[in-house]
């Protein structure tokens, strides 16, 4: 097969991905998450006891990845959340495990970060906020299955299972969101405000049947 033939086949495949309707789904029984792709636009749907919502935007594909450009201010997939966790120390007897939230933007504590505690069905047990030192204590650790941490200043959420850390004091580092799309012009500079998420395509039997986002596999179902 010549290089020109390969290039034609690649361009044809990318055109098909962009124009035909495709639905990629992740479902582990607790969360159902779908990317619906058509005509270089996508709709994202997430359903769970934790949260259910829809978002949208545009996308483009290469032979190795799909780049999703979310509209500004829309919610982002749970699978985009990070798990950057560091164990600081063990919990002393008669003390509660403590979480310190750190911003990767400036490595400072995140005061007023939102901390949501959930049970095994992903139902909310309690909503907390970190103090001025970025700290919050988990007073009933045995009941907590999952923790979600977020802020309001452009960081990715952190979502993780809490059981491995019930006897530890930990630091959770929030990563910054990657932005792209059409820039907004301000008097001083151009600002990007649309979140960009890149998923890797896994080739299975020479088809684009699976893509991976943060280790979560989305399978082509339609």
Image: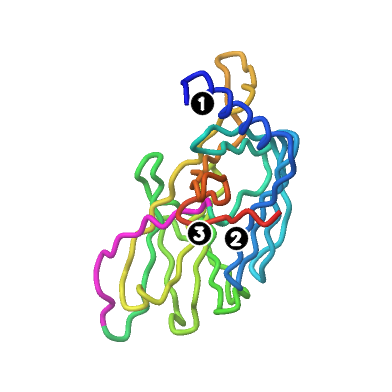
The residue that mark 3 highlights is 149
x and y, in percent, of residue 52 in the image: 71, 62
Work out whether 47 lies above or below 173.
Answer: below
Rounded to the nearest angstrom, the CA distance separating label 1 from label 3 is: 45 Å
Residue occupying the point 38% across, 58% down: 172
Q: Look at 73% across and 52% down and name the residue there.
A: 54
Mark with earlier residue (1, 3): 1
User: Residue 83's image quarter?
Assistant: bottom left
User: Which residue carries the number 1 mark?
Assistant: 6
- Give the quarter of the image for residue 170: bottom left
Can you name the residue that lies furthest to the top here? 187
Which quarter of the figure has residue 183? top right
Res. 26 mark: 2
Relative to 219, is 105 above or below? above
Q: Is residue 33 above or below residue 37?
A: below
- Foreground of the two, 30 or 157: 30
Residue drawn 74% across the image and 44% down it:
21
* Residue stretch rendered in magenta on the structure: 80-92
Side (left or right) of 88 relative to 83: left
Counting other residues with Cα less than 10 Å from the Cα at mark 3, is it few (<14), some (14-19), or many (20 or more)? many
């Amino acid at each position: 097969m010549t290089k020109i033939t390969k290039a034609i086949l690649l361009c044809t495949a990318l055109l098909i991905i962009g124009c035909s309707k495709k639905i990629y789904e992740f479902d582990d029984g607790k969360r159902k998450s779908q990317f619906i792709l058509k005509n270089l636009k996508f709709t994202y749907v997430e359903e769970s006891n934790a949260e259910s919502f829809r978002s949208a935007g545009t996308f483009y594909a290469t032979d190795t990845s799909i780049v999703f450009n979310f509209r500004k201010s829309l919610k982002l997939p749970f699978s985009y959340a990070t798990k950057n966790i560091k164990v600081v120390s063990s919990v002393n007897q008669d003390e509660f495990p403590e979480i310190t939230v750190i911003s990767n933007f400036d490595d400072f504590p995140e005061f007023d970060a939102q901390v949501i505690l959930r049970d095994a069905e992903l139902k909310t047990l309690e909503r907390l906020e970190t103090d001025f030192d970025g700290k919050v204590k988990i007073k009933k650790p045995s009941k907590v299955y999952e923790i979600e941490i977020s802020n309001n200043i452009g960081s990715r959420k952190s979502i993780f299972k809490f059981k491995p850390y019930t006897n530890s004091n930990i630091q959770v580092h929030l990563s910054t969101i990657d932005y792209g799309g059409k820039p907004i012009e301000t008097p001083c500079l151009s600002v990007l405000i649309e979140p960009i998420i890149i998923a890797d395509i896994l080739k299975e039997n020479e088809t684009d049947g699976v893509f991976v986002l943060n280790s979560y596999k989305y399978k082509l179902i339609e």
